[in-house]
Image: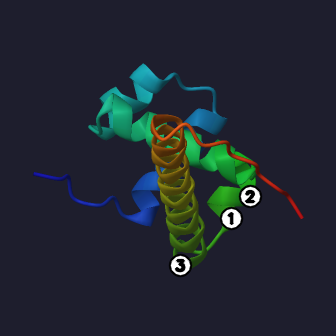
């Protein structure tokens, strides 16, 4: 069963606490969220390149869009990597050479 999606004000609390130098353990205790959830949102923010203040200042809709777009791009990247790995395996299996051209 997947967990219920967090509301943006809950995610902003994570960012506010981390900005105030709270440890992940402290954030977990005070918010009741799992350690992995807290880490996930902190990683997403780091991947976005935004600082804590900028993320906190975003509207709920803007923050939601930012976090959703990051997830979609990570899924697309993982999908591409999986397809590339399968393609390489198949080429090796058939003793075929792979030439990649970037343009």
Q: Which residue is mark 1?
A: 57
> Viewer-nearest of labels 3 and 1?
3
Residue marked by disc 3: 61
Q: Residue furthest right?
A: 103
Looking at marks 2 and 3 on the same chain, the residue that comes earlier in the sequence is marked by 2
Q: Residues within 10 Å of mark 1 (few under 14, many from 20)?
A: few
Q: Residues within 10 Å of mark 2 (few under 14, many from 20)?
A: few
Q: Position of residue 37 (x, y in %)?
A: 36, 40
Q: Quadrant of the C terminus?
A: bottom right
Residue 25 position, x and y percent, is 40, 21
Say whether residue 14 is visible.
no
Residue 25 appears in the rendering: yes
Q: Whole-Å distance between the Cαs marked 2 and 1? A: 5 Å
Q: Which residue does the image show at 26% across and 37% down from the upper left?
A: 32
The CA span between labels 3 and 1 is 11 Å
In the foreground, 71 or 41 = 71
Q: Is 77 positioned to the left or the right of 4 in the image?
A: right
Residue that appears at 57% across and 48% down: 44
Q: Is residue 24 left or right of residue 50?
A: left
Which image quadrant is residue 4 in?
bottom left
Residue at screen point 65% across, 37% down: 19
> Which residue reaches farthest left?
1
Residue furthest to the front in view is 95
Decide: few, some or many residues near mark 3? Use Cα within 10 Å; few <14, some 14-19, many ≥20: few
Residue 10 in the image, given as x and y percentages of width and height: 40, 55
Residue 33's x, y, as percent?
29, 39
Local SS, label 1: helix
Compared to residue 67, the image places residue 15 above or below, namely: above
Residue 94 is labelled as none
Q: Which residue is mark 2?
A: 54
Q: Secondary structure at mark 2?
A: helix
């Amino acid at each position: 069963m997947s967990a219920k999606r967090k509301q943006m004000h809950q995610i902003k609390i994570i960012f506010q606490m981390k900005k105030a130098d709270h440890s992940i353990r402290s954030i977990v205790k005070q918010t009741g969220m799992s350690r992995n959830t807290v880490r996930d949102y902190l990683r997403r923010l780091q991947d976005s390149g935004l600082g804590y203040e900028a993320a906190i200042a975003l509207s709920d809709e803007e923050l939601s869009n930012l976090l959703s777009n990051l997830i979609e791009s990570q899924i697309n990247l993982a999908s591409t990597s999986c397809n590339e790995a399968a393609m390489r395996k198949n080429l090796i299996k058939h003793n075929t050479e792979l030439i990649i051209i970037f343009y």
